[in-house]
Image: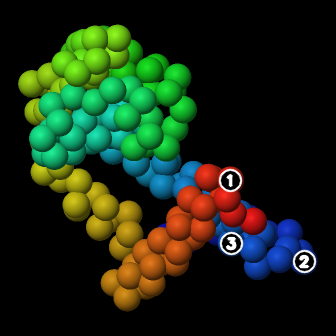
Amino acid sequence: MTHTLPSTRPGASPAEQSFRQLIRDFGLIERVMQPYFARFGISGAQWAVLRNLYRGEQEGQPGLRLTDLSRRMLIRPPSVTGIADRLQKVGLIVRRASETDGRSKQVALTTKGRQVVEQILAVHQAQIARVMSGLEVDEQKHLSHLLEQLGEHLAVLATGTGA
């Protein structure tokens, strides 16, 4: 079944068309992924926190400060705090004092949180393949390259040093 998306306004520049399409596609990805994560009892934003904590463990960091999570996820600290609050309430993460800075709190996965991450990771590649299956492998590689270029440019703009 083919879905037709609303066309861009006539006369829109290629930059505007691409920008609008990127935003639209991001929204559609969220619509596809939210029910997927809901099967595991979490949201996409909660998955991002859990996945980053899991990666931290794999890198030898048994916990991360909320500011570090915020930086990794590219979102504001208050947003991370709200997500962490909800994850703590359902027993997927725990807050504890930092071992290196007593004024700082770290969040870490609980056993239950680690089990949820591992349960999702067991099927996650198949879900990603399903989402990306609208493109051939060469197209996926090309898209990845273009998005990497755009990401590098956006990172420069985000630091305030770009045009």
* Residue under label 3: 18
Quadrant of residue 129 within the rendered picture: bottom left
Residue neighbourhood size for the residue with mark 3, other residues' Cα within 10 Å, grouped as few (<14), some (14–19), many (≥20): few
Whether pointer 3 and pointer 2 mark residues with C-beta atoms closer than 8 Å, the reply is no
* Residue under label 1: 160
Tag 3's secondary structure? helix
- Along the line of sight, which residue is nearer the eye, 34 or 161? 161
- Residue 149 placement (x, y as % from top left): 53, 74
Tag 1's secondary structure? loop
Tag 2's secondary structure? loop
Cα separation between marks 1 and 2: 30 Å
Residue 87 in sight here: yes
Residue beneath the point at 45% across and 84% down: 142
Residue 92 in sight here: no
Pick whichever of labels 3 and 1 is earlier in the sequence: 3
The residue type indicated by label 3 comes to Ser
Decide: is 89 above or below 27: above
- Residue 130 placement (x, y as % from top left): 32, 65
Which of the labelled discs sits on residue 11, or is there none? 2
Pick whichever of labels 3 and 2 is earlier in the sequence: 2
- Residue 65 placement (x, y as % from top left): 33, 26
- Along the line of sight, which residue is nearer the eye, 153 or 116? 153
Residue neighbourhood size for the residue with mark 2, other residues' Cα within 10 Å, grouped as few (<14), some (14–19), many (≥20): few
The residue type indicated by label 1 comes to Gly
Is 33 left or right of 113, judged from the image as shown?
right
- Residue 153 placement (x, y as % from top left): 60, 68
